[in-house]
Amino acid sequence: GGGGGGAICQLFVSLCFVQEVRSKSKVCANVFCGAGRECAVTEKGEPSCLCIEQCKPHKRPVCGSNGKTYRNHCELHRDACLTGLKVQVAHDGHCEEKTLEKVTNSPIVCYLTDRNELRSRVIEWLQSEAEPDGWFSKGSNFSDVLLKYFQNYDNGDAQLDSTEFLKFIQHNDTAINVTSPYAEEENNRLLRSLCVDALIELSDENADWKLSFDEFLNCLRPGFNPPERKCALEDETYEDGAETQMECNRCVCACGNWVCTAVICDGSNKLPALEEMEGNDQEMTEEEWTRRVAELNKHQETTKEV
């Protein structure tokens, strides 16, 4: 019947396969292929070294000279074979993470989201004090509460500077705990004072880094929608969080200003910089550095979004 033909056919295929395996072991008997390769038989029946199709799944991690961790030696050599790149074993075990370098190279900044979050938290607790038992109560109104705080933290010059503003904010510590998951406690304190500066800048009409009572009221007025300032560079605008490079330092756009790290460059940690920022001077004094960052920021005012 028809079924028998199928069985014969199948038998024939498996015989061919057995023959192929046999010829492979014979042809490849004395052929040595390098690490990550295996011997295969070409159509002409000749031996050829190809990249290993599949490594055995055993797990003994190694670190390659390319900084990549592989499951085992075989995987490393297979990758080298497939990519045609020279990858050697740097050491057994996982490669060490190089994330620390990144963190130290980026400045700690207060982004728009940090600034706005801090502001809305402060407004929240001010509102709860202005209307202690919901809107039925007589309660004191919002500007009265603010005036009370203003007088409480002002040193007598009828203005709040950043230190006084920070004290005012810290009196309700739990409500305003702005923290960055990456930062140490000390950096979180720094972040908070940077966000205070960003808040002051928000309504500081005469740019003296101090807030009169009216400016203070404007800054924390619930109906006020803070403008989203952008950063400018070479006639282009950059969104909050954009990064650029100045020599070996990273600069970040935060609340409309470029903020840069100030590491002295020694050439070894030079990262690819924006061409126009490249300076030949390797060592910069602090004043020079401050001047360079100020130059970077001098176009900001024109691009401030109103």
Image (spheres, rainbow, N blue to C red):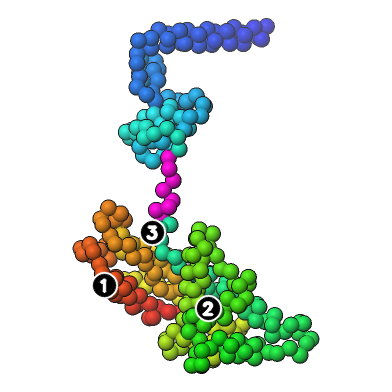
Residue under label 2, please give it: 166
Q: Secondary structure at mark 1?
A: helix
**Circle nearer the N terminus (1, 3):** 3
In the picture, the disc for residue 142 is none
Q: Within the image, what quadrant is residue 51 found in?
A: top left
Q: How many marks?
A: 3
User: Which amino acid, mark 2?
Assistant: Leu
- Residue 302's x, y, as percent? 38, 81
- Residue drawn where x is 65% and y is 77% of the image: 124
Q: Secondary structure at mark 2?
A: helix
Q: Is residue 144 left or right of residue 305?
A: right
Q: Nearer the viewer, mark 1 or mark 2?
A: 2
Q: Residues within 10 Å of mark 3 (few under 14, many from 20)?
A: some
**Circle nearer the N terminus (1, 2):** 2
In the rendered image, residue 93 lying in the magenta stretch gets the answer: no
Name the image quarter holding the N terminus: top right
Residue under label 1, please give it: 288
Q: Is residue 4 left or right of residue 252?
A: right
Q: Which residues are magenta?
A: 95-102
- Residue 237's x, y, as percent? 39, 71
- Residue 54's x, y, as percent? 47, 26
- Residue drawn where x is 76% and y is 82% of the image: 134
Residue under label 3, please give it: 105
**Is residue 167 or residue 52 the one in the foreground?**
167
Q: Give the residue furthest to the front.
A: 155
